[in-house]
Image (cartoon, helix red, strand yellow):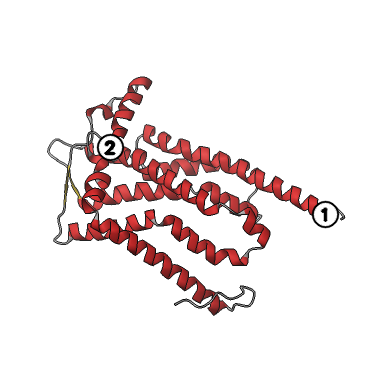
Amino acid sequence: MAKKRKDPNEMSFLDHLEELRWHLIRSTMAVVIIGLVAFLMKDFIFDTIIFGPKKADFPTYGMFCELSKTLGFSEAFCGGGPNFRVQSRVMAGQFSAHIWTSIWAGFILGFPYILYEMWKFISPGLYEKERRNSRGFILVASLLFFLGVCFGYYIVAPLSINFLGSYTVSEEVFNDIDLGSYIATVRASVIACGLIFELPIVIFFLTKAGLVTPEILKKYRKMALVIVLIVSAVITPPDVASQIIVAIPVLILYQVSIYISGYVLKRDAKKAKRNAKPS
């Protein structure tokens, strides 16, 4: 069992490492337990979730079809889902995919608890005022993460799967996609978007630490746009429409982060002015 928590002002470096070790152990146990549940729900996890974006009736394709018709773009999504088979070419391929997919499911679903454990480790080193100001951190960070996961699953993953799974260089070549490659595409889309959507939280803490200001964010807005487009190009197929679809919410998050940074600085300035008044 973990030792009773000591006063952070009296803890040595080794004590901090011991405390961190127990937080990591509890986080890992949560991922393993949730992963075990996911392992037992194999049919739902794979047939419904993992292979959902491959099916013609996946809701995203109908939405993109109507959107492309409205905007006068190519109606590539109106033919349903991509036409390819998923294969396993190694003896332990399916079993290995089952285990690792369950672990990643444990991480995604257990993300709020992981944040909670990390917060329990960090918060004793903060002032009481800083802890009060950061109230709701776990809820907001978890909400943003799951919004990003949903965006990655319903937008980025179908775009990538439809484009890459249907792309051909010749009629002589047919697509039989390896199971690991297919799962990696879905996983990368989901987790990358989940982490990208944490941008406002990151900016909040960087502003509190005095490392970022609204002026800095505005100054480097053009550079941020280039970085966003590069990230969009990495996690989406190489077509302009897909990159724009992914870039728009990230740019919105960046603009929201500017407002958050400004709000934090104004609030801290008001508190500093109030505390400076003679009693």
Query: Callout 1: few (<14), some (14-19), or many (20+) C-alpha neighbours within 10 Å?
Result: few
Quadrant where the image shows the C terminus:
bottom right
**Which residue type does callout 1 highlight?**
Ala
Horizontally, residue 225 falls left or right of residue 269, namely left
Residue under the image location 16 percent in, 36 percent down: 170
- The answer for how far apart the CA atoms under marks 2 and 1 are is 60 Å
Front position in the image: 247 or 208: 208
Image location of residue 1, percent across then percent down: 44, 77
Residue under the image location 35 percent in, 25 percent down: 67
> Viewer-nearest of labels 2 and 1?
1
Residue under the image location 39 percent in, 46 percent down: 149
Front position in the image: 215 or 98: 98
Image location of residue 206, percent across then percent down: 60, 54
Identify the element where label 2 is drawn: helix
Q: Are marks 2 and 1 in contact (CB under 8 Å)?
A: no
Q: Circle 2 is placed at which residue position?
A: 163
Q: Is residue 124 above or below residue 234?
A: below
Residue under the image location 64 percent in, 56 percent down: 132
Q: Is residue 166 above or below residue 235?
A: above
Image location of residue 115, percent across then percent down: 48, 58
Q: Circle 1 is placed at which residue position?
A: 276
